[in-house]
Image (cartoon, rainbow, N blue to C red):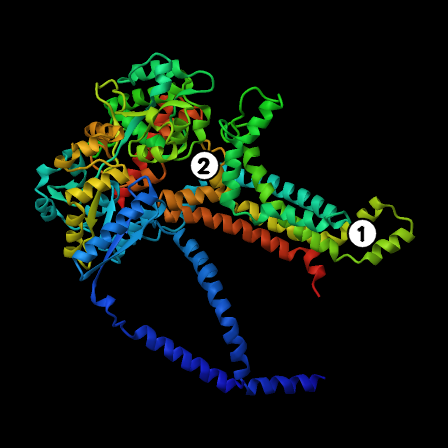
């Protein structure tokens, strides 16, 4: 066997053209990844070390000054704290709701296909539609939510969902979960369908009830799905921008300012490319660290062939 | 297919591509001069504007068969950055249309063409309303040909005011409070006033600062945001919400255009708004439009009112490839007949004295209000001028809304809030001057 492999590799070395075709086929993808991912990411990190502004081509290298300014800026720490809380709350709710609905639509219920399709609708809607829809729902003059609450006798005057400090986070997290949980549901559904029915049949024969089956078969088999969804939710929620920007633009005041909205504000509204890039780099580093932890975790490694 | 054949086909295709890209396109159209015109909408109705520009570009091209106008519609979201970046890199269109806050900083760096010859061809500076021309002048030279003027005026519901016994809109700050308080009843609020970190908030506040005798940057370059006059304006602004309670609480979260919806639907009795919005409100609320009046902003402690100017002008980049053709296009669009039509469809006032008071234009209430407001409408930078360094960052970050937001949403006293905003403003100006 060893001899055969060696012979084969010698043949390959003799025909370098065999590598050119796969290389040529992969090239467009590699070029796209470089152009739209690696190059911009490298630029962001580079600009974070400069005093570059949006409307000026000249700039100078200032080392870590943007970072030292950033770390002494209370608004940065506030946005950081908001991003962590938002990630934990919205991410957890997405996983809980996604998992719950996946269990539900995995059962043999009437119109299962229809329900699955309906539940996916929020996920296929563009952010701008979701954001504006919720802005209208929350409106104090003509919003349907306030109308319902008043007519149900639950409140006397409209709630200012996007203004009132007690409600604004709820008002931001609700549409985020509404938009995001169907994706989690899909992931869990795929994982649930990959569990062999034989395991449940054998458990039944052994006398396991539904809860025991869930605890000892379903949950362990979904470990990978939970890990993957957990990581993706941390990534998606931590860099979440669109819905928050459409709904509140980080307001009222800085009440819902996230790192992503702070970065956008500095780069595109304040034209401070350098400073804003430093915020974006912090987001990147945090998510990179999370990804490394995930990839290095024993649970993932143990699943590798 | 064998590997050699694949390589051969790829090589042939690549060669063809190179040949196609390298060949100059010798078509009939390319023999024409292409005049590149970059434009962010200055009107309020996109449909009306598109029809106007399409019609008159065609006419200009017909009269000048050697010129083709290539107009690019820009988004306001990145127009300022794009314009500045183009000027810096030299990859510029020939012609653009903007406010002084966009072209004067680059004019100060020598990147905009002086257009005094065009001004002269249009009759000279004396033919222009002074407050429209002055923002485009620096050191005695002119860098923009004014083509429209707009500013924030007070829109009011005649029917609501009448219902509460007021036959005329407010002329002073005291009257504004009195009428707004009287009209705040049964879910209707007296005044629609932006309170969030938006350009509407900062622009209305800047107008009030001017009415109170305040300023942002003095002629000598000193930042004077924390002045007693600006504090008076801030207290007046925030009291309308906190003390008099005449502003809807949701105004903290209002976005551009929300006040137009509410004045149109009769849920606020008055609101400061760009006068040109009148044309759009007429489209949006045809039934109630006759009940909506427009008047200049009420006067403050100085005895005069204050507003934020939205004057617009054509300007030519220094590195424009076809500056003479650009000038020809400006002169064409400044012809009285075309210009009057432009004013009506775009909701703007004419900067030409000879046209500004034309009865065909002054018959519109919004038009009269803007024209009367013009002398008391300020530019960013106030006394120093719109070319002041750092103003793009200040405007982009809505620093001038910070005093209001600090009081309304962050719980600071007006004094504290103004001091914080002053520090922020001064730091940005200082950093920009150092660069």
Q: Quadrant of the N terminus of chain B?
A: bottom right
Expressed as whole percent of the image width and height from the top left, the position of residue A214 reads 80, 47
- Point out the residue furthest to the front here: B287
Chain to which the residue tagged by mark 2 belongs: A
The answer to which quarter of the image holds residue B178 is top left
Q: Which mark is residue A75?
A: 2
User: What's the residue at 36%, 38% (across, down)?
Assistant: B397
Determine whether the residue tagged by mark 1 lies in a helix, strand or loop.
helix
Using residue B260 as the reference point, say whether residue B313 is left or right of it.
left
Residue A177 to residue B210: above or below: below
The answer to which quarter of the image holds residue A177 is top right
Q: Are marks 2 and 1 in contact (CB under 8 Å)?
A: no
Name the front one of labels 2 and 1.
1
Chain to which the residue tagged by mark 1 belongs: A
Q: Earlier in the sequence, mark 2 or mark 1?
A: 2
Residue A63 to residue A3: above or below: above
Residue B261 to residue B232: above or below: below
Q: Out of A256 and A117, give the one closest to the viewer.
A: A117
Q: Out of B48 and A159, give the one closest to the viewer.
A: B48
Expressed as whole percent of the image width and height from the top left, the position of residue B203 reads 31, 31
Expressed as whole percent of the image width and height from the top left, the position of residue B430 reads 28, 39
Q: Which mark is residue A217?
A: 1
User: What's the residue at 24%, 34% (across, down)?
Assistant: B379
- Point out the residue furthest to the top here: B165
Crowd around label 2: few <14 · some 14–19 · many ≥20 (10 Å): some
């Amino acid at each position: 066997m060893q001899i055969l492999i060696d012979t084969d590799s010698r043949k390959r070395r003799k025909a370098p053209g065999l590598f050119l075709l796969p290389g040529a086929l992969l090239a467009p993808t590699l070029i796209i990844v470089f152009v739209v991912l690696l190059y911009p990411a490298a630029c962001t990190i580079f600009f974070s070390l400069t005093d570059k502004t949006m409307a000026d081509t000249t700039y100078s290298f200032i080392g870590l000054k943007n970072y030292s300014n950033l770390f002494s800026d209370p608004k940065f720490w506030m946005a950081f704290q908001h991003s962590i809380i938002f990630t934990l709350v919205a991410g957890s709710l997405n996983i809980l709701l996604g998992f719950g609905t996946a269990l539900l639509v995995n059962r043999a219920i009437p119109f299962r296909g229809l329900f699955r399709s309906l539940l996916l609708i929020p996920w296929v809607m563009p952010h701008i539609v979701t954001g504006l829809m919720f802005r209208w729902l929350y409106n104090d003059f003509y919003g349907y939510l306030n109308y319902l609450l008043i007519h149900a006798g639950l409140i006397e005057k409209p709630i200012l969902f996007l203004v009132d400090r007690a409600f604004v986070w709820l008002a931001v997290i609700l549409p985020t979960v509404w938009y995001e949980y169907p994706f989690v549901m899909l992931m869990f559904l795929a994982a649930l369908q990959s569990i062999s029915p034989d395991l449940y049949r054998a458990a039944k024969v052994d006398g396991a009830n539904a809860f025991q089956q869930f605890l000892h078969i379903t949950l362990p088999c979904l470990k990978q799905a939970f890990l993957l969804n957990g990581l993706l939710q941390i990534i998606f929620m931590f860099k979440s921008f669109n819905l928050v920007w459409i709904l509140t633009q980080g307001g009222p005041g800085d009440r819902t300012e996230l790192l992503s909205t702070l970065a956008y504000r500095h780069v595109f509204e304040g034209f401070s490319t350098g400073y804003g890039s430093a915020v974006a780099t912090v987001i990147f580093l945090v998510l990179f660290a999370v990804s490394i932890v995930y990839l290095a975790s024993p649970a993932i490694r143990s699943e590798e062939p | 297919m064998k590997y050699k054949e694949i390589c051969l086909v790829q090589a042939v295709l690549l060669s063809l591509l190179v040949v196609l890209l390298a060949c100059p396109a010798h078509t009939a159209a390319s023999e024409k001069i292409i005049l590149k015109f970059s434009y962010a909408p200055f009107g309020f109705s996109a449909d009306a504007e598109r029809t106007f520009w399409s019609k008159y570009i065609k006419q200009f091209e017909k009269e000048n068969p050697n010129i083709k106008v290539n107009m690019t519609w820009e988004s306001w979201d990145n127009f300022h950055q794009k314009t500045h970046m183009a000027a810096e890199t030299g990859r510029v269109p020939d012609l653009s249309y903007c406010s002084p806050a966009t072209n004067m900083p680059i004019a100060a760096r020598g990147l905009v063409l002086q257009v005094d010859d065009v001004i002269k061809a249009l009759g000279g500076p004396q033919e222009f309303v002074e407050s429209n021309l002055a923002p485009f002048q620096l050191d005695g030279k002119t860098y923009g040909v004014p083509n429209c003027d707009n500013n924030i005026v007070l829109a009011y519901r005649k029917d609501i005011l009448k219902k509460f016994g007021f036959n005329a809109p407010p002329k002073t700050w005291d009257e504004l409070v009195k009428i707004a308080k009287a009209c705040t009843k049964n879910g209707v609020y007296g005044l629609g006033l932006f309170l969030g970190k938006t350009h509407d908030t900062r622009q209305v506040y800047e107008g009030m600062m001017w009415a109170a005798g305040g300023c942002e940057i003095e002629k000598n370059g000193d930042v004077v945001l924390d002045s007693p006059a600006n504090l008076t304006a801030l207290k007046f602004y925030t009291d309308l919400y906190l003390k008099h309670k005449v502003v809807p609480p949701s105004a903290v979260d209002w976005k551009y255009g929300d006040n137009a919806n509410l004045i149109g639907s009769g849920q606020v009795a008055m609101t400061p708004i760009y006068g040109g919005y009148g044309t759009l409100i007429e489209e949006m609320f045809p039934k109630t439009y006759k009940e909506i009046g427009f008047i200049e902003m009420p006067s403050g402690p100085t005895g005069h009112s204050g507003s934020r100017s939205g004057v617009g002008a054509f300007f030519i980049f220094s590195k424009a490839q076809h500056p003479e053709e650009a000038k020809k296009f400006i002169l064409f669009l400044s012809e009285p007949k075309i210009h009057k039509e432009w004013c009506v469809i775009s909701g703007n006032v004419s900067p030409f004295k000879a046209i500004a008071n034309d009865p065909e234009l002054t018959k519109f209430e919004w038009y009269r209000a803007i024209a009367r407001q013009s002398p008391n409408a300020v530019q960013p930078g106030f006394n120093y001028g719109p070319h002041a360094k750092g103003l793009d960052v200040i405007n982009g970050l809505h620093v001038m809304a910070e005093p209001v937001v600090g009081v309304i949403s962050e719980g600071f006293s007006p004094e504290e809030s103004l001091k914080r905003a002053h520090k922020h403003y001064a730091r940005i100006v200082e950093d920009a001057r150092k660069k």
